[in-house]
């Protein structure tokens, strides 16, 4: 059981954070949870999510902006520990309908292990 306080009953990632839906954990602390994507788009593909339910980047304000810095510190640490920092990798956050966001709980995709293409589709 995590220390999530404001989880939403109908949110897939809140259920994953609580452990109600199983996931393959990469990292966890009191503020965030990282787990492998069920449909990986690169040899390494995991998601980093705040434990607090925030819908997307569009819901970041000066009151909750600290979580974003924390998540990027965690990503930088994991990239070094998992060995892909030097080769390079990509961090993506899809936002809303046009951004192709499918789960409305803020998450950062971390993709590594292959050369990425640009522009993204
Ligand atoms: P989005 O499309 O919102 O940017 O990203 C949502 C991501 O969540 C997708 O890459 C999708 O594969 C992943 N996903 C959806 N359902 C589950 C699940 O039940 N478990 C895991 N580990 N990933 C999921
Ligand atoms: Zn949620």
Image (cartoon, rainbow, N blue to C red):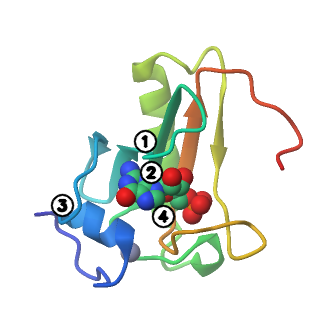
Q: Nearer the viewer, mark 4 or mark 2?
A: 2
Q: Measure how far apart labels 4 and 3 are at the Cα level.
A: 24 Å
Q: Nearer the viewer, mark 4 or mark 3?
A: 3
**Residue 73, placed above or below residue 100:** above
Relative horizontal placement of residue 15, taking residue 90 as reference (left or right): left
Relative horizontal placement of residue 46, taking residue 88 as reference (left or right): left
The residue singled out by tag 2 in the image is 48
Contact between labelled residues 1 and 4, with CB atoms less than 8 Å apart: no
The residue singled out by tag 1 in the image is 74
Q: Going from the N terminus, do you reach mark 4 or mark 1 first?
A: 4
The residue singled out by tag 3 in the image is 19
Sort mark 2 into few (<14), some (14-19) or many (20+) by Cα contacts within 10 Å: many
Residue 68 percent coordinates (x, y): 52, 59
Contact between labelled residues 1 and 2, with CB atoms less than 8 Å apart: yes
Q: Secondary structure at mark 1?
A: helix
Q: Measure how far apart labels 2 and 3 are at the Cα level.
A: 15 Å
Sort mark 3 into few (<14), some (14-19) or many (20+) by Cα contacts within 10 Å: few
Residue 64 percent coordinates (x, y): 48, 74
Q: Nearer the viewer, mark 3 or mark 1?
A: 3
Check residue 66 in the rendering and tell me which mark sits there, or answer none: 4
Q: Measure how far apart labels 4 and 2 are at the Cα level.
A: 15 Å
Q: Secondary structure at mark 2?
A: strand
Task: Out of 62 and 33, give the one closest to the viewer.
Answer: 33
Residue 84 percent coordinates (x, y): 54, 19
Q: Secondary structure at mark 3?
A: loop
Relative horizontal placement of residue 74, taking residue 68 as reference (left or right): left
Q: Name, please, the residue furthest toward the left.
A: 1
Seen at 49% across and 27% down, the residue is: 79
Q: Nearer the viewer, mark 4 or mark 1?
A: 1
């Amino acid at each position: 059981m995590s220390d999530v306080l404001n989880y939403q009953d109908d949110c897939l990632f809140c259920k994953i954070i609580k452990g109600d839906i199983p996931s393959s954990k990469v990292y966890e602390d009191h503020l965030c949870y990282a787990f492998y994507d069920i449909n990986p788009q690169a040899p390494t593909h995991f998601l980093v999510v705040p434990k607090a339910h925030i819908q997307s980047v569009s819901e970041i304000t000066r009151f909750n902006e600290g979580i974003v810095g924390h998540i990027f510190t965690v990503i930088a640490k994991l990239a070094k520990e998992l060995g892909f920092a030097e080769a390079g990798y990509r961090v993506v956050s899809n936002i809303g309908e046009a951004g192709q966001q499918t789960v409305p709980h803020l998450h950062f995709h971390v993709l590594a292990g292959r050369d990425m293409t640009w522009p993204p589709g």
